[in-house]
Image: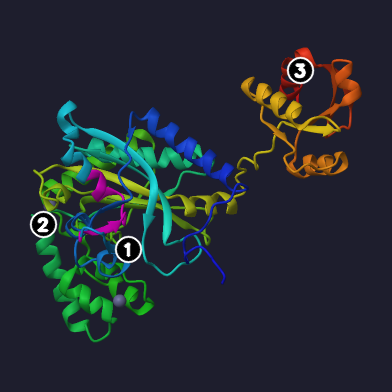
């Protein structure tokens, strides 16, 4: 029997985790500087959170959720999207009580039963941030600015931000009517998915990936021509704030977010060289989400950023990440009691050094080979003769230089040499 990880759910191995840790630490630091606190919601929610929050007629809810019945007969779903659980938690814990808005961020796995492809997985990791409780364009500009500065902080260029508005309950119905009028005579030419979207989620007709459908979408009426006064003024406000902050964007009316709850501002950002560009984050305003979840009207705006995709772009762009973690010191024993090495390692670790000892009862030559394989910076040789003299031999692996160091002040001696490298 061959046991493997589920398809599309990759292991992230110790050789790769340093890059992840660097990226996550940078994102957390950027969020901290913006005054956002971390929120951790459970990995599963009651299925209604996504059905009501994301919309029953969406691809996510129709085809991509990991839904199961627990032993109590309740329907639970693995986190299929980042925002609905955050809003559920905001409502459940009354996070607005300390004064609005609530500013939160998360780094967590998202589960979608999607066809796995490069940079897309059935379990992927998302960084996202939300501002809940403000209808003001300043909130949109702040959180979009956070996403842009986060990408820059990782060492990438200012991403290519595409910005639009999807209107609100006042103006969108009129636009959808115009959109349906345009598509009605063309329904014979579009794919089955588009025919279904025509009935259930017409905005998403503009989002079809099939080439002939994209051509038809390009000729469709543009929502920006249908915005009501309030939505037009909101978009103008967001643009003015972004201009003031030096955040660059392109107005692109083809940007429609895949989820039902979006209102007004919507954006997508691409990163990487032209021709090899990847979507690195997307987001927008969701003023109706709280009501769809059964809460009071509560405006919100935020984004989600896929970390696998981001790491792919960082690699393509040659942005160096941290290397694998190698021990600073490997303690090798030559005929010495293993407990001497273990006790010494324990002491040095408390001094802050990263120390590895042999736990395979290997001979000295094999231990030296292992130290080399691990990339240890120094090896400390504990030999019986040296121990009797109260010293050990410290060898710098890169240069081969060796010297005797007194056991009594070993911590200091090793630490100062590790720091001097
Ligand atoms: Zn289509
Ligand atoms: Zn409007």
* 268 vs 347: above or below: below
Residue ID at (53%, 40%): 21
* Label 1 or label 2, whichever comes before in sequence order: 1
Q: In this image, 355 relative to 49: left or right?
A: right
Asked if the stretch drawn in magenta spans residue 79, the answer is yes
Instruction: Tell me: is circle 2 under 8 Å from ligand 2.
Output: yes
Q: In this image, 72 relative to 421: left or right?
A: left
Colour treatment of the image? rainbow
Q: Residues within 10 Å of mark 3 (few under 14, many from 20)?
A: some
- SS under mark 3: helix
Kindly identify which residue carries mark 1: 66
- SS under mark 1: loop
- Marks 2 and 3: which is nearer the front? 3
Kindly identify which residue carries mark 3: 410
* 416 vs 123: above or below: above
Instruction: Tell me: is circle 3 under 8 Å from ligand 1.
Output: no
């Amino acid at each position: 029997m061959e046991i493997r990880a589920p398809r599309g759910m990759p292991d992230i191995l110790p050789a790769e985790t340093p890059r992840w840790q660097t990226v996550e630490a940078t994102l957390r630091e950027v969020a901290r500087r913006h005054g956002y606190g971390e929120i951790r919601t459970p990995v599963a929610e009651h299925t209604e959170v996504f059905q009501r929050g994301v919309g029953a007629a969406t691809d996510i809810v129709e085809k991509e959720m990991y839904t199961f019945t627990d032993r109590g007969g309740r329907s639970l779903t693995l986190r299929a999207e980042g925002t609905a659980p955050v809003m559920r938690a905001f409502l459940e814990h009354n996070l607005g009580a300390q004064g609005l808005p609530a500013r939160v961020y998360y780094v967590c796995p998202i589960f979608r039963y999607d066809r796995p492809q490069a940079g897309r997985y059935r379990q992927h990791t998302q960084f996202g941030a939300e501002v809940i409780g403000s209808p003001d364009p300043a909130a949109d500009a702040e959180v979009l600015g956070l996403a842009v500065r986060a990408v820059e902080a990782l060492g990438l260029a200012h991403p290519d931000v595409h910005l639009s508005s999807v209107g609100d309950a006042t103006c969108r119905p009129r636009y959808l009517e115009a959109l349906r009028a345009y598509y009605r005579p063309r329904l014979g030419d579009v794919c089955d998915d588009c025919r279904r979207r025509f009935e259930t989620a017409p905005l998403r007709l503009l989002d079809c990936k099939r080439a002939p459908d994209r051509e038809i979408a390009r000729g469709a009426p543009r929502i920006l021509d249908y915005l009501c006064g309030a939505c037009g003024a909101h978009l103008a406000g967001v643009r003015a704030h972004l201009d003031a902050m030096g955040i660059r964007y392109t107005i692109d009316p083809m940007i429609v977010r895949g989820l039902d709850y979006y209102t007004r501002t919507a954006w997508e950002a691409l990163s990487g060289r032209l021709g090899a560009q990847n979507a690195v984050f997307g987001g927008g305003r969701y003023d109706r989400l709280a009501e769809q979840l059964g809460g009071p009207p509560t405006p919100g705006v935020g984004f989600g950023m896929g970390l696998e995709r981001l790491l792919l772009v960082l690699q393509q762009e040659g942005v160096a990440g941290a290397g694998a973690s190698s021990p600073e010191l490997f303690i090798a024993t030559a005929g010495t009691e293993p407990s001497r090495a273990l006790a010494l390692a324990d002491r040095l670790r408390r001094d802050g050094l990263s120390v590895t000892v042999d736990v395979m009862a290997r001979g000295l030559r094999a231990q030296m080979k292992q130290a080399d394989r691990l990339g240890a910076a120094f090896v400390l040789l504990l030999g019986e003769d040296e121990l009797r003299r109260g010293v050990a031999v410290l060898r710098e692996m890169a240069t081969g230089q060796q010297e005797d160091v007194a056991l009594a002040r070993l911590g200091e001696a090793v630490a100062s040499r590790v720091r001097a490298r």
